[in-house]
Amino acid sequence: MGNTTSCCVSSSPKHRRNNHSRLEPYRPEAEVSREDTACNLQHISDRDYIDDLPMEYNPSDHPRASTIFLSKSQTDVREKRKSLYINHQNPGPMRRKYSSCSTIFLDDSTVSQPNLKYTIKCVSLAIFYHIKNRELESKMVQDIFDEKLHPLSKTEVPQDYEKHNPEQKQIYRFVRTLFSAAQLTAECAIVTLVYLERLLTYAEIDISPANWKRIVLGAILLASKVWDDQAVWNVDYCQILKDITVEDMNELERQFLELLQFNINVPSSVYAKYYFDLRSMAEANNLSFPLEPLSRDKAQKLEAIARLCDDIYKDIRKNAKKRSVSADNLTVVRWAPAILS
């Protein structure tokens, strides 16, 4: 077996050490700075990443950042509870329905198919809290959103229009009119709120009694074009708002996009966060979604959907599972002794 011409022989450790001993000793080269190189590329440690930015300033981009409207609404909710506790007042009858052994209550709103009416109510309430709990310090004002400079109707705007906050019902009527006339979906309302908060964050402006209508109109206009396959044209909004021109709508859309830095992407995680935060705000403000007893037909539909999803995920888990090799198909490599002459 010591024959060097055999194919089974390998070099001995001593022979390998001799090969390494013939190598030249390692000599470290002089360090060359990036300024001295021909291509001055940016180092990976110098690059800015969106994930490294403070998430609390980007609620419409990061799924883990808290939404602005929820934090502003919680301030009023805490004050109401504190007032009821101090004055020993009864909060009133509980309108919430609870399930029992004989009856199960469910609402018809899901993250994929929200209830249109109550979603618009929740979005209107979120806009109301934005206006009510806005910062008192004056921020940069965008002329395109000023209703005094760009009125939506021929009715004269009062001189002190910026001092009176609109009621939640007034905001709801304005949003509901646009959604019912343009036949928009509930998902579009959630995307509208995402764009509204993204505008407030990117442009560093506040929504106030002087600009809330045009900001909401611009957000609805953009959300309808991004979300719906058959988008509403700008000229169609002129049929809803009789006194507005197409040129004004085009300029509103253009400047809205520029202030958003043309970032119209809404990840599914951000959309889901806004949906559940709207539900949390609604529950805290006694604006619960309508509950109905679970009927036999609805129970059968839910069971069919659950069975379908279970079959789909079962196949996915089966394909992802690592299978062991069968012993029947296992081929063992046998080594035959070599006969050297």
Image (spheres, rainbow, N blue to C red):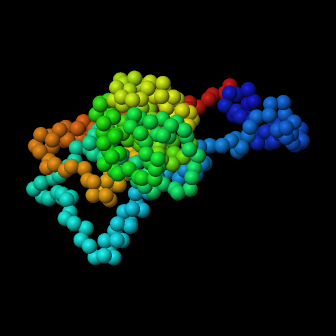
Which residue is at a point 34% across and 71% down the rendered structure image?
Answer: 83
Q: Is residue 199 left or right of residue 190?
A: right
The residue lying toward the viewer, choosing from 118 and 334, is 118
Left or right position of 57 against 274 = right
Q: Nearer the viewer, residue 175 or 159?
A: 159
Q: Residue at x 36, y 36 (%)?
A: 188
**Residue 7: percent from left, percent from top:** 68, 27
- Residue 263 in the image: state x and y as whole percent: 53, 35
Nearest the viewer among 216 and 68 is 216
- Classify 89 as above or below 276: below
Q: Does residue 91 lie above or below 235 as drawn?
A: below
> Residue drawn 21% across and 49% down?
290
* Quadrant hosting residue 6: top right
Instruction: Give coordinates of residue 299: x percent, y percent.
Output: 15, 43
For residue 231, say whether it is visible: no
Residue 331, quarter of picture = top left
Image quadrant containing the N terminus? top right
